[in-house]
Image: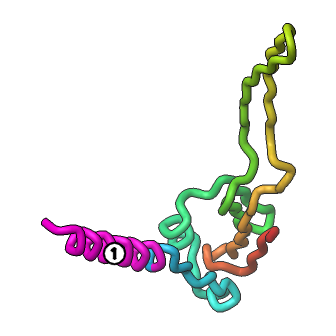
Amino acid sequence: MNTRSIAGISWFTMLALMVAFIAGCATTRPIDWNSRVGTYTFDQAVTELGPPDKQAALSDGKIVASWITHRYGGTSFSVGTGFYGGNSAFGVGQTIGSGYPDRVLTLTFGTNYVLAAWSKNY
């Protein structure tokens, strides 16, 4: 196989990978929660979003359920060494959290289990 055909294959491969990458980065449209008020049920929410992270029944019979849609934070751990002249050092560090609050979607359902209100903290 000559070098010209190898170069052609590699350019084709690069082009195919770029197209696949760009297609994979397409974002989904955000949900219009206002259009779902009055029609979206609690069962549909659990089917689409999974079980809520928190749920409470209010005294008037409404249900308030919250889903964490994006969790920030986490834990990181690092180890390092250093040398200077005849001396050496060893260090260990740990970081917990990122300072950003989790993204939370809160849906309030009426006594008929239909979406009555919604809010999000982002």
Image x and y of residue 56, in percent? 73, 57
Label 1 crowd (10 A; few <14 / some 14-19 / many >=20): few
- Please state which of residues 3 and 60 is positioned toward the viewer in this rendering: 3
Name, please, the residue furthest toward the left: 1
Name, please, the residue furthest toward the bottom: 35
- Please state which of residues 52 and 111 is positioned toward the viewer in this rendering: 52
> In the rendered view of the protein, which quadrant contains the C terminus?
bottom right
> In the rendered view of the protein, which quadrant contains the N terminus?
bottom left
Q: In percent of the image, x 48 and y 78: which residue is there?
A: 22
- Magenta stretch bounds: 1-22
Q: Under tag 1, what secondary structure? A: helix
| Dominant secondary structure (helix, strand or loop) of the stretch shown in magenta | helix
Q: In percent of the image, x 85 and y 8: which residue is there?
A: 86
Q: Is 87 situated above or below 40?
A: above
User: Which quarter of the figure has residue 96?
Assistant: top right
Q: Which residue is mark 1?
A: 11
User: Which quarter of the figure has residue 113?
Assistant: bottom right
Q: Is 80 situated above or below 65?
A: above
Q: Is 77 situated above or below 39?
A: above
- Please state which of residues 106 and 109 is positioned toward the viewer in this rendering: 106
Instruction: Count the labels in the image.
Output: 1
Magenta stretch: includes residue 7? yes
Amino acid type, label 1 = Trp
Q: Is 102 situated above or below 40?
A: above
Magenta stretch: includes residue 59? no
Image x and y of residue 83, in percent? 81, 17
Left or right: 99 in relation to 43: right
Image x and y of residue 39, in percent? 59, 87
Q: In percent of the image, x 71 and y 80: which residue is there?
A: 116
